[in-house]
Image (spheres, rainbow, N blue to C red):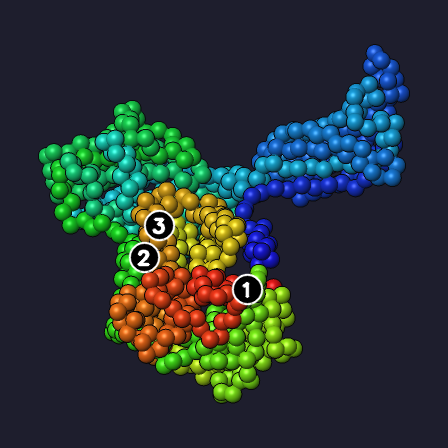
Amino acid sequence: MKKCIKYILFCLVLLIGFPIISFAASFKTGISDIVNNMPNTSFERLDLFNSRCQAYYSYGLGGKPAYQLSGVIDNGYEVDIDLTIHLFLYDADENVLGELTKDIQIQEKNTNNFSFLVSAASHYDFDFNLIAKYSYELEVKTDVEREESVVNSEYYFNDFNVDIKVSKDNIYSIEEKFDVVFKKHITAIKKEIPIRYIYKRDLNTVNKRSITSNIKIGDNYTEELVKGKNVLTIGEVDVDNTTKHYDIKYDYNVGKDTINKNDEFMYYINNTWNCKIDGASFKITLPKETNDIKVVLIDKDGYEIEDNFNYEINGNVITGSIDMMMEDDNLYGIKIILPDKYFMDATNNLNSISVISLIVPLICIVLAILVYYLLNNIKNIKNTSLYPYKNLNSIEFSYLYNGRIKESDIGTLLFNLCNDGYIDVVKNKDSYTIVKKKDYKNSNNLEKAFMDDMFKYTDQVDREQLQVAMRNMKERIVVRQDTKKNRKKLFTNDLFNFKLIFWLLVIAIFVLITINTLTDYQMTYLWINLIVSGVGYGLLLRATVSRNNIMEKIIIALVSIVLIISPIIFTCLEAFKLNPLNIVVYIIGIICMIIIAIIANGLPNRTAYGRKVLNIIRSYKEYLLNVDMEVINDEIVNNRYYFYTIIPYALVLGIGDKWYNKFEKVELVKPSWYIDNAKKFDREKFYEVVREIYSDMFFAYKK
């Protein structure tokens, strides 16, 4: 649970540090005595002055005392601002008594008066007579930086002209010429070219990827991808002039027509310049002449506009004009309806990153499944031996089977030593006693460590003494069995294991689908998504394959989901809305990541020898479960204690009860190491004792 808490704290730090961008500015004055005027104060482009307090000893009809606090605020911004004024009242020790607020709006380059009336006649949560000091806090609500930049660079277009040459593969060679009149002086202007070509057509929404190329501008410009648009920042500040001519050329590949019926030419005069465009003229040259043609002007919802639109068709050339003022964010489309299959050589304009992001994860899954199959499909070795592999003791056998020393299996070694004549088990009335029969003489280090620890203080260990007897046994046995030599023989090096490669594939898929999501949207969000979502996916995959309890898994999973979704919501949710293929790629990528992670977790980390031995033991387990009783009866003739010989191995394999039930109709002799006072051997009570010892020794390790 402590690890879980650490995960949560770490994730909270990530979320707190996550950059959610919003404008907020607040400025606070110092504290002034109620009888004194507030000193003039400046904050950025705001000035607070003439702030004073006027006391009334008899105010209103009730004749109650009151204070009127007032002042003047000067707005130096070139934009109207919304302002909230907070008045804080204090006692003589500068403890806050109360807060009053007032909202005002100040026009650009203007001043506003404000005042607060604090009367004893009003019902406050504090004692009016304790008021001794006051201060103000000014909170600017308008994003003045954004608004001011718009106002400072306010301009409008004159003589906006568009010349478009359309090729047979539906590529528009566009030249835009226009004059710009600036309010004060020339500044850089921004042109936005959408990556997605989206418009309404016949009650359908056309959504195609467009490609911008061959940009030529007779001016300095920079290009960047911002929220699904190529943004061209053109020109520089020129304080000596207020008008400028622009000539912008670029190719715009709008891709294949996706709707059967008619082909269409569609060009939007999209006013994203934060200004007004006083009409526009256009010339459109189609690749070939056709009689079946219709030209219309539509708005952003696809509805036709008949007024203020003129055009003329001359062969394959259409010229015309839009004779109206286009406001900021207005959208007008020149639509030319053409015969079906007019554009024969157009392409789908698929993003190569999207195709790769879709195909690569699927290929990775196929490879992962193939590798998993090859590593687990060792040649089946049919084991028909009645005895365990190489006559190993039960701990050595467990190590080969499980790949580690399991606490539950250490106790099975007791029954090996019983069968070898070193230990007796004495059945008491309600319990049992483990008795040392003789000193250990063989050379097996595991068995010697078990005997030394079990009988370190006494030769007889009852049920209550097990915990003391086994205090250090696990560590001693693990050190002797889980050696570097044994690990090297049984397991592969992690650095050269396919498991590591699979986890690298998971990371690669995550990076790939994240890049794909932002390729046509805004790559500056990449690191935010990779780091925050990456931590989320890491925790989620870890919770999926870990052995944590269910509550810890649920908590980690919830925190993971928050980390995964947060960057998407705050940075690139619009990228999914713009391109539905991004959703498909992302979901398939996540599914592939989870599947490969599960496969990686299930990959054998064993050498060829380790896998071979594991296969032999698994085959031995199946043989014990299915061996014909006639074969066992023949073996009992040679070894009447055969049932007891196999008990420790059956417990290791998890088939102890099935092994016991297999001998239900076999008459067993009492083992020489089991001592009780009963006149007749009771196999059920015997097996109960075996299960009790096995269980008690396991829980002794847990304490």
Residue 670, image x and y in percent?
43, 71
Q: Residue furthest top?
A: 61
Query: Circle 3 is placed at which residue position?
Result: 587
Q: Please tell me which of labels 1 and 3 falls first in the chain.
A: 3
Residue 624, image x and y in percent?
32, 68
Query: Circle 2 is placed at which residue position?
Result: 357
Residue 393, image x and y in percent?
43, 78
Q: Residue 130 got which mark? A: none
Lateral position of residue 697 relative to residue 251, left or right: right
Query: Circle 1 is placed at which residue position?
Result: 696
Residue for point 27% across, 44% down: 208
Lateral position of residue 492 relative to residue 481, left or right: left
Crowding around mark 2 (Cα neighbors within 10 Å: few <14, some 14 to 19, many 20+) is: many
Mark 3: which secondary structure? helix
The amino acid type of the residue labelled 1 equals Asp
Q: In whole angstroms, how far apart are the C-alphas of marks 1 and 3? A: 49 Å
Mark 2: which secondary structure? helix
